[in-house]
Amino acid sequence: MRYSLLLLAMAASLPLQAKTLSLKSPNGEIEVKVSDDDAPHYAVLFQGKPVIGASKLGFDFTNAANFRGGFDISDSQRATVDSSWEQPWGEARIIEDKHNELVVSFTHPDSKQGYKVRFRAFNDGVGFRYEVNADTPLNIGRELTEFAVEEADKAEAWWIPGRGWNRYEYLYQHSKLADAALVQTPFTFKNKDGVHIAIHEAALVDYAAMTLNQRRPGTFVSELTPWSDGVAVKTNGKFNTPWRTLQIAANATGLINSHLILNLNEPNQLGDVSWVEPGKYVGIWWGMHINQNTWGSGSKHGATTDETKKYLRFAADNGFDGVLVEGWNIGWDGDWFHNGDLFSFTQPFADFDIQAIADYGREVGARLIGHHETSGSVSNYRKQWDGAFGLYQKMGVSQVKTGYVADGGNIKRIDENGLERFEWHDGQFMVGEYLDNVKTAAKYQISINTHEPIKDTGLRRTYPNWLAREGARGQEYNAWGNPPNPPEHVAMLSFTRMLAGPMDFTPGIFDMGFNGLGDNTNRPQSTLAKQLALYVVLYSPIQMAADLPENYLKRPDAFQFIKDVPTDWEQSIALDGEVGDFVVMARKERKARQYSGNDWYLGAVTDEQARDVTVKLDFLEPGKTFEAQIYQDGKDAEWKWRPYEIDIKKLKVRKGDTLSLHLADGGGAAVRLKAL
């Protein structure tokens, strides 16, 4: 009896044996291991090899005990999903959702505190989020989530810095993984085995955006963008975090072909969204960037009644849906970058008759696209939302481009005590502000294209009127950026920023020499054929023909591709490419309005290195013949001095054939595969 009691006493004093749970993707290639050994952590394997080593989970709170060590796995549940869903618009109509789920409950044996982590393993990656259900408010000081890259010293990465003054608008760097310090997501890297991984987040709602801080070599820690008072996230104690995501692929194109981010978002919450329409537009925009016009009033004012009518006629004559007009409203005069409180979103300049413009648009068959620039003064903007969207609805405006030009950390809000506070674009406050703007616009059946945005995390699935965002260096940097975007830029975006979602890059510049040709001027470091290819390579449901109308009329043969190419797709496939080097995309049009739904489009772009790519047409439907309308760089084309040399030709092809496309340095190719 004494011996038995002694054994029981010894057992009570020993720690519980650590538990480890495993979750695999449907195809078995990805495995997640979750353990409570020492402290809660997870690890990820791909094809049997570790890619993410033991990585901690948990939180530090500013007003409560931390979720660190001492938490044990107390329960778990599993589920399997094999389904599909349809996008109202998108890069693909049908999205397959196949995943296995593991929900792990962690509990502290002494305090009885607890939380859950929900893991989902897909064939293209892993998502996990925290689910907390506390009785009292919890303010998060730090999220402890880690991503410990295996054999990090042998990995290379492509990245932009996190929490900089220029938000997300930086040139991507290619370096050893060790040289990436505080980085923004999506953060893309490749390990020694050639496995490509992108870390990001999905469904960012009522939480701070995540950057990644490489603390110990190879270990990236979640670093949340704080409020102006230093708190990272303020909660009532009951909250779900965004999903922390790992897109994983054996090659670079596998990252582009992933639908992980969309699948981790909630379904459409707006109901009938038939009023949300993809399309193409032109605009009174590029002229300001190249100093032909001004946003402010005066002799060079761009947003006049007469000029807008000219653009509306051009749009209607060439099959475009609308005309974006910037600089139409009171507030642009003077130092508008710093005077956001002066903007009125209902009062036009005297030379902009918005009613006459709306009437003329209805007459010719092209509509006005709205513009709201806030200059970061979001309280001034919010109080005008209903009036501004109401005015636009009355004028037949169904899309609005919003802007939040301000340095990072310099968004101006007025708090509940009437005091000025300055926040980050990607802090919890602005995460809510952007989403509230989209929800309010939906009440007026208006879609939003956000510039200087919070990064995309797939919320277009939940709120389909959130059409596109900027969130990277766009075309305008080629007009005045220092330096302009280099030839590799688009091939970088394809495997980094574009993994998050659609980008309003504003392609289609036909006049490369507005500042002269060569490599020492601000201009697109691109050939003409590459500008066409951007409409296929860089996905957006709304695409701009960004140049001045007269420049398109000078090159009608090349302009034909822009008029033909859709913006809504039945299917999209990344066929070939390497990060920062080149990319080849194929997309099939979705049946809608003037588009038959039978044609395919190809886009290919390269960096500063000329290359010839061979495209296998295995994706075409069997038994059909297609006319390949090819727009590729001429044999002597190159971006510095001969950007306009373009070879336009036609030939008949079928499934199983191949196309050989020539890409000049800084060049590209665009192809319409028209079903016959």
Image (tube, rainbow, N blue to C red):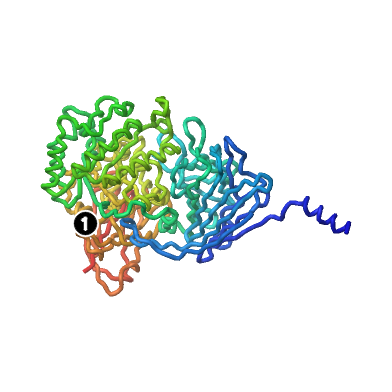
Q: In the picture, residue 385 is in which quadrant?
A: top left
Whether residue 611 is visible to the viewer of this picture, yes or no, is yes
Q: Which of the two residues, 163 or 172, is positioned nearer the viewer here?
A: 163
Residue 363 position in % (x across, y down)? 10, 47
The N terminus, quarter of image: bottom right
**Residue 12 x %, y %:** 77, 52
Up the image or down, 516 lies above or below 149; here it is above
Q: Does residue 494 appear to the left or right of 326 in the view shown?
A: right
* Residue lying at the far right of the rendered structure: 2
Is 48 situated left or right of 607 in this image? right
> From the image, which quarter does the C terminus lie in?
bottom left
Which residue in the structure is indicated by mark 1? Answer: 564
Instruction: Identify the residue at horizontal 53%, vertical 41% (top origin).
Output: 213
Snapshot quadrant of residue 7 = bottom right
Q: Nearer the viewer, residue 653 or 16?
A: 16
Q: Secondary structure at mark 1?
A: helix
Residue 202: % across, % down: 45, 50
